[in-house]
Amino acid sequence: MLGKTLLIRTDASAEIGAGHVMRCLALAQAWQRSGGRAILAFAAGAELEERIRSEGADVARIQARPGSRGDAVQTSDLRARLQADWLVLDGYHFSADYRRSMQSATSRLLLVDEGAELQPGEWDVVVNPDPDASAEMYSRPDGRTQYLVGPQYALLRREFLEFRREQSEVAEKAQRVLITFGGGDSHNVTLQVVQALQDLEDLNLDVTVVAGVSYQHLASLQAAVDGSSQGATLLWNVEKMPQLMSRADLAITAGGGTCYELAFMRVPMFLITMAKNHERAVGAYTAAIAAVDAGWFSSLERSTLAALLRRVICDRELRKRLVENAGSMVDGKGAERVVETMHAICERGTKVTA
């Protein structure tokens, strides 16, 4: 693997969130540990550039609208200049035409997927860490593509893998509550949750609210936190998430990549669905009794949300089951397994071609 180049094309914004970039950073870190070079290319997400560089990865900028034809042309040119051995695509704005234009006789192609949204195509590896994912969800009868599916392939960043987790008892009552809805939260569900928790003032909660780097409602959220009947703190653009998660008795979040981090950190999860591509994952966590499903954010009345939260906060046995079931799903070796597969494909010298 020594000296091989990995080019990752992904984006972050208020609408897209930052989860795609963060899990790609985990893949880049694993690639670097194997001796290779990693470059992340953005058309949107400049605010994360310093974070990426601080992890030792290189950054390239795509000067075109994300997912556009111009984007595809620039990405192809960048791949050729770098002589990249692998190209990774992670994002739902990369259309079937975009992905087809990335096919190459020289570079191998890996796509990161959720919800089995991808249609059949010419690629080497598909990674889908959804709890219910299976290769049968994809229609590819010739078997040339390798499908790395399930939470054993969850991509966790080095900061989680190196954090020393303490095995602690599940609290009788979940007093320390963490609210985090990723890098964007364009629907401002964070504020919705903070307002619902105000109705539980008798529970005397310690609430930590994390707003992501692309969050655009800081003024209204800060006002709600300042006026909260709970002990509440607002943090923005946090880099030390393992430390925050480690002290939480309950986390309120969406159904994206944060779930794998919380499962690994053994924190009970209360999930609110914010995007169609998260719906299946939330359902799978719920079916496995690995999380509590509150439903779609757009359908949640404040009183209903408050009542659901009260039940979970006060039910120790339920939270204990959530921790046990979710914790067994994610062991932190997902990125390593993906890179090992990529390495094996390189050693075989085979290439998927049309």
Image (tube, rainbow, N blue to C red):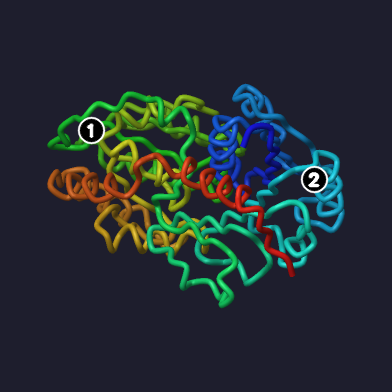
Mark nearest the camera among 1 and 2 is 2
Q: Which residue is mark 1?
A: 175
The x, y position of residue 332, in whole percent, is 39, 39
Going by the numbered disc 2, the residue's amino acid type is: Arg
Q: Is the C terminus in the top left, top right, bottom left or bottom right quadrant?
A: bottom right
User: Is 220 left or right of 95, judged from the image as shown?
Assistant: left
The x, y position of residue 190, in whole percent, is 46, 43
| Label 1 – label 2 distance at C-alpha | 49 Å
Q: Which residue is mark 2?
A: 79
The x, y position of residue 218, in whole percent, is 56, 33
Nearer to us in this view, 178 or 120: 120
The secondary element bearing badge 2 is classed as helix
The x, y position of residue 83, in whole percent, is 80, 42
Count of number-bearing discs: 2
- Mark 2 and mark 1 in contact (Cβ < 8 Å)? no
Going by the numbered disc 1, the residue's amino acid type is: Gln
- Residue appearing at x 30%, y 53% in the figure: 291
Task: Name the mark on residue 94.
Answer: none
